[in-house]
């Protein structure tokens, strides 16, 4: 990924993580269907497990430069990510439902995935994995000036 900007690299990693998680979801769906599970239920279980894998990989790969600041932050990210996944599923389903009769099943499914994925990326990049917020403090020069003033006063 040489020659790419930081943002382009992040999008590439995001896409690779998404593809791997989709592969995991499809493998789970296929295995459960082969064992006799109802396909919509198997797909939902595969989606739920894949979403958790996606959260872990997103934390460790896609947004690794934005570490968490403790358990509370990690829990908030996990909840935020899962809420985002549900919103994405809603976007995907709504888009598919609105357009599949006009453009066909496969293009409608692809459009739903693309729009849902855009929602996930933007929400995760701007909100869920926004990075640790620094507590406001004195400017470095002000700290240095205060320390120098205290040393002179001694």
Image (cartoon, grey):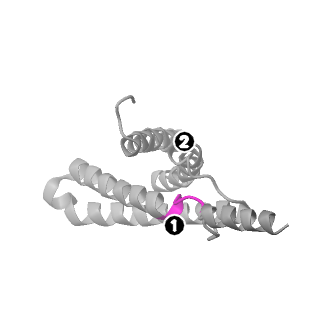
Q: Which residue is mark 1?
A: 83
Query: x and y percent of residue 140 in the render?
Result: 62, 61
Kindly state the secondary structure of the residue where label 2 is placed.
Answer: helix
Q: What secondary structure prevails in the magenta region?
A: loop
Tag of residue 7: none
Q: Which image quarter is the N terminus in?
A: top left
Q: Residue 151 versus residue 96: which sits nearer the camera?
A: 151
Q: Can residue 154 be seen in the rendering of this structure? A: yes
Query: Measured along the vertical axis of the image, is residue 3 above or below residue 142?
Result: above
Residue at the (41%, 55%) spot, across then down: 121
| Quadrant of the image occupied by residue 138 | bottom right
Query: Measured along the vertical axis of the image, is residue 112 above or below residue 36?
Result: below
Q: Report the span colored magenta.
A: 127-132
Tag of residue 61: 2
- Magenta stretch contains residue 13: no
Q: Residues within 10 Å of mark 2 (few under 14, many from 20)?
A: some
Nearer the observer, disc 2 or disc 1? Answer: 2
């Amino acid at each position: 990924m040489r020659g790419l900007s930081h943002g382009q690299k992040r999008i590439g990693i995001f896409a690779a993580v998404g593809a791997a998680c989709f592969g995991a979801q499809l493998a789970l769906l296929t295995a459960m269907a082969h064992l006799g599970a109802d396909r919509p239920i198997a797909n939902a279980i595969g989606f739920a497990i894949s979403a958790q894998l996606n959260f872990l990989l997103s934390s460790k790969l896609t947004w690794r430069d934005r570490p968490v600041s403790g358990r509370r932050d990690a829990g908030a990210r996990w909840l935020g990510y899962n809420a985002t996944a549900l919103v994405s599923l809603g976007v995907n389903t709504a888009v598919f439902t609105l357009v599949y009769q006009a453009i066909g099943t496969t293009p409608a499914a692809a459009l739903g995935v693309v729009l849902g994925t855009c929602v996930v990326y933007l929400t995760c990049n701007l909100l869920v994995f926004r990075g640790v917020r620094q507590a406001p403090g004195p400017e470095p020069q002000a700290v240095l000036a205060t320390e120098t003033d205290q040393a002179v006063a001694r």
